Amino acid sequence: MNPILNLFDLTGRRALITGSSTGIGFALARGLGGAGAQVVLNGRDQTRLDEALSQLRAEGITAQAARFDATSPEQVTEAVARIEADSGPIDILVNNAGMQRRAPLETFSHEQWRTLMQTNVDSVFLVGQAVARFMIGRGAGKIINVCSVQSELGRPNIAAYTATKGAVKMLTKGMAIDWGPHGIQVNGLGPGYIKTELTDALVNDEAFSAWLIGRTPSRRWGDVEDLAGAAVFLASDASRFVNGHVLYVDGGVTATL
């Protein structure tokens, strides 16, 4: 193997990916597993987790599942400690759990705001902190926080979501500053408009898709597979001097007006 390619090899490393039973999280788990990592899937729906686990194992990926709520301090602390004790060190953490809620800001309820903040921001803080405490003791670790093009750009009716993803971007930088001296690299992965079950309505909206494709320099929607290579890079030794950065995988959306 070309020595430079060795830098991307994740063999022998364990990766926990939150919110990974479907969609982007599952694609990231598959990508890291394909690069050699042992992956730990996470979600709240055991049936979906079991289905995802079976699919990865059928592809030859070493995988297990950890069912817990990434917004619950108690569940996060217990689950991370259990994985570390029973399975081994978490070398890579991908904070992917997230959700979207669309509504004009003037009608957005406080309860919707709290739910969005807990899911998109609190989970990154809670799981990141729980895993980092173990990484600090080992003097090494990789944390990838899933941001969004909405960490930089706004759209009508998603002001609250934009606020959460802007917060994740800045939390990523703060984590890198505090934990970098302990040998940990913390970076963000910023997907653009990606085809998933959560974006089906937008994909099938001919007017929106035409607008988006025309605005995107690569002239297409993204696929979940487009994110895997960037995730492997950020999880591997190839990015050992990359810290506090957000890597946008968006076909150029953030580059143009």
Image: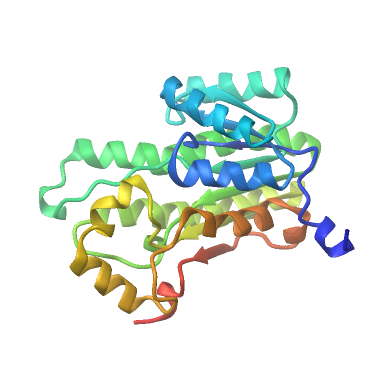
* Quadrant of the image occupied by residue 238: bottom right
Q: In the picture provided, is 18 more to the left or to the right than 198?
A: right
The coloring applied to the image is rainbow
Residue 254, image x, y percentages: 42, 73
Where does the image place residue 208, in percent across and percent down from the top left?
Answer: 22, 67
Extreme residue toward the front, this view: 58
The one nearer the camera, 19 or 36, is: 36
Which quadrant of the figure has residue 237?
A: bottom right
The residue that appears at 78% across and 50% down in the rendered structure is 9
For residue 252, above or below residue 141: below
Q: How many marks?
A: 0
Task: Name, please, the residue furthest toward the left.
Answer: 107
242 shown above or below 111: below
Which image quadrant: the C terminus? bottom left
Please provide percent x and percent y for residue 94: 57, 43
Instruction: State the residue at coordinates (52%, 25%).
Output: 76
Residue 36: percent from the left, percent from the top?
A: 74, 43
| Residue found farthest to the bottom | 257
Question: Viewed as shown, does residue 140 lie left or right of 15?
Answer: right
Identify the residue shown where x is 16% and y is 54%: 105
Tell me if 244 is positioned left or right of 215 in this view: right
The residue drawn where x is 54% and y is 53% is 172
Q: Is residue 161 above or below residue 16?
A: below
Locate the N terminus and report the quarter of the image it occupies: bottom right
* Residue 184 falls left or right of residue 68: right
